[in-house]
Amino acid sequence: MSSAIVAVMGAVVLVVLLALVVITRYKVAGPNEAFIITGRRGQKSTDPETGRVSVDNSGQKVVVGGGVFVVPFVQQRFSLDLSSRHLPMAVRGAVTLRGVKANLDGVAIVKVGGSEDAIRAAAQRFLQQQDGIVRFTQEVLSGALRAIVGRMSVEDIIRDRAAFAGQVAEEAEASLSGQGLILDAYQIQDITTEGSYLEDLGRPEAARARQEADIAEANAQRVSEQARLKAAEEIAVAERTLYLRQAEIRVETEAAAASKGTAEADAMHKKADAFARYGDAAVLQMLVEVLPQVVAKASEPLGAVDKLTVISTDGAGQLPRTVANNVAQGVELLDSVAGVDLASMLKRVTGGRDGSTAPGTTAAAAAASPNGRIEVTE
């Protein structure tokens, strides 16, 4: 094998080794991760505000969300988690401003600060025991909670929990920032007291709310009762109006009936007086007025005949004789049923053919009526 081939192969192997070294030693930090690179030499840095040049002799380099080449055998890489940590908080027996022991349950969210100084401070304290961040934060917040609770009453804590949480964060900020930590949020979830303090505290408000509810209910019932009474009053007024109208109609009806009865009675009295005064003459006048109607009714059967064939030796003269016979039979029927002898009555009224006047009431009737007609008022 020639020396040229050996040289080429050696170069290829060297390139591959260099590539492997670069690939394995170049590290990229995640978005929630910080790299602390140790073993580097100090570097100069210039403060942009003052222009002062300083030399970093800590031998540390902080990389957040970027890539860095870790020199083999010279530098070493450490990783610090920047994710938020959820901490349950529970404080028991914290004494308030008024000496009431309160129990508080809440939740806190803490994380490592994003600046290089905060990352270095947190790395110095929690790099090898990052779970200790939760325990340390709980201790700091517990002390801050007790300090703030001692300056406030239970009523103030309940009334403005946001202000209370803000004061707790301010109280714990100095202790946490010195450790490279930041309190993202703190919320109070529940507040209880020993004994019945909270129940007693809410009794006046509950009593007031119950009183307002009773008053509102009473007002609603009063309005409903007023509406019911008004409706009942309107119904009563309508019934009274109807009753009075019915009474008026009844009185008017009775008055009309009484008036009609009086008029009929007066008419009957007048007829009775006329009959008593004129006797047979009055009756005769009524019969004479009715007699044409009787003759007309008797002739109706013959008038309704469209065609009449008379089979008789008497000829056409038989027809008027038949009508006359019907009238005569009607007069006889009147005599037999009503007991009225029309012929005798005519004789008494006329007093015979010589024109003499019958005595008594008949003569008086003739004298009272010059035209021979007797007036009978209905």
Image: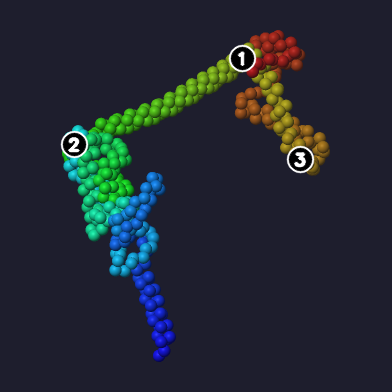
Q: Earlier in the sequence, mark 3 or mark 2?
A: 2
Report the number of discs. Answer: 3
Tell me which amino acid carries mark 3.
Answer: Val
Name the mark nearer the viewer: 3 or 1.
Answer: 1
Graded by Cα atoms within 10 Å as few (under 14), some (14 to 19) or many (20 or more), the crowding at tag 1 reads some
Eyeballing the image, is 121 above or below 101?
A: below
| CB under 8 Å between discs 2 and 1 | no
Tell me which amino acid carries mark 1.
Answer: Lys
In the image, what residue occupies the spot 82% across and 38% down?
315
Q: Mark 1 = which residue?
A: 270
Name the mark nearer the viewer: 3 or 2.
Answer: 2
Q: Position of residue 136 (x, y in %)?
A: 22, 51
Q: Mark 3 = which residue?
A: 305
Graded by Cα atoms within 10 Å as few (under 14), some (14 to 19) or many (20 or more), the crowding at tag 2 reads some
Q: Position of residue 172 (x, y in %)?
A: 26, 44
In front of the other: 279 or 169: 169
Q: How is the image coloured?
A: rainbow
Q: Earlier in the sequence, mark 3 or mark 1?
A: 1
Spatial CA distance of label 3 from label 2 is 129 Å
Q: Mark 2 = which residue?
A: 100
